[in-house]
Image (cartoon, rainbow, N blue to C red):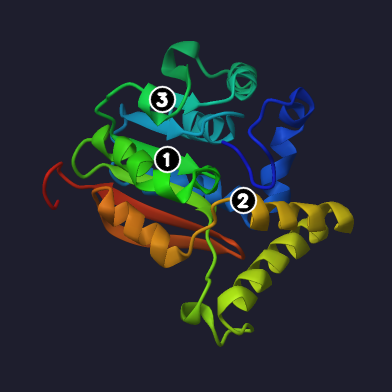
Amino acid sequence: MTHPATTPFTDLAAVARYAEGPRRNVPGYDSVLPMVRILLAERVPADGRVLVVGAGGGLELEDMALAHPGWRFDGVDPSQPMLDLAAQRLQSAGVSGDRVALHHGYVHSAPDGPFDGATCLLTFHFVPREERVAMATEIRRRLKPGAPFVAVHLSVEDGDAGAGFGGEGGAGERDLWLSRYAAFQVASGVAPEHAARARDKVAAELAVLTPQEDEAILHEAGFGDVRMFYMGFAFRGWVATAARQGGAQ
């Protein structure tokens, strides 16, 4: 899993500090992890196999593996240092190595499955807009029909859909939510100047879409029953199910 306001994790100092980041950046992060596994467990069997896209760091792998000792996992991430960190975390938690396979690369580097469920947490906002559908499609084609998929990432309003709730729509609405993102970091102990730089980096460099665009991408990639289950300032989360390839579920 990667977190916002950073470049991909190749800097070893950033990797070492990784576990601190999600709780500082993501409102309610300690509740997001159990929500994710609760949603998966509605359809993933006790001996299920789960694909984790953006698995570096190992936070969600550790959480799911400890809560569901019968689940097996394939995790994929483009950062080898982050995968090494995930392996260390899982080993320290006592998670057997034969339950988790870690793959260096992007989603197309993951096994074909089929998987009983999948997650992609705090990762999609690093993916350029023009590559989102292809990435989501690669995840969906690895899932069994009806399998759950859970995604959480930065997603903010940018137009009339969000106007009227403390903002003016358009760029003003987007700026408002990103400013709230920075304010949460400050409330979590981040120095104001660092939070301001992180906010500016997110605005300038990350592919932060609107919730409507994010949901449309999931539908186009072949997911159905797309439901938002979480919103924390600039972050949102969805659960969806994999439709049968070539047709509706």
Image quadrant holding the N terminus, namely: top right
**Dot 1, crowdedness within 10 Å: few (<14), some or many (≥20)?**
many
| Direction top: furthest residue | 98
Considering depth in this image, is 185 or 129 the residue closer to the camera? Answer: 129
Please tell me in which quadrant of the rendered image residue 213 appears: bottom left
Residue closer to the observer: 1 or 39: 1
Sequence-first tag of 2 and 3: 2
Which class describes the residues within 10 Å of circle 3: few (<14), some (14-19), or many (20+)?
A: many
* N-term-proximal mark, 3 vs 1: 3
Residue 173 in the image, given as x and y percentages of width and height: 60, 76
Disc 1 target residue: 119
Q: Is residue 241 left or right of residue 126?
A: left
Q: Tell me the kind of residue under disc 2.
A: Tyr
Whether 191 is drawn above or below 96: the answer is below
Q: Looking at the image, do the residues carrying marks 2 and 3 touch, with CB atoms under 8 Å apart?
A: no
Question: Which residue occupies 41% across, 25% down?
Answer: 73
Q: Which secondary structure, mark 1?
A: strand
- Which type of secondary structure does the marked residue at label 3 adopt? strand
Q: Amino acid at mark 3?
A: Phe
Callout 2 crowding tier (Cα within 10 Å): few <14, some 14–19, many ≥20: some
Of residues 32 and 192, which is closer to you in this image?
192
- Which residue occupies the foreground of this view, 155 or 169? 169
Residue 129: percent from left, percent from top: 45, 50
| Numbered label attached to residue 29 | 2
> Which residue is label 3 attached to?
73
Whether 9 is drawn above or below 30: the answer is: above
Residue in the image at 48% along x and 28% along y: 65
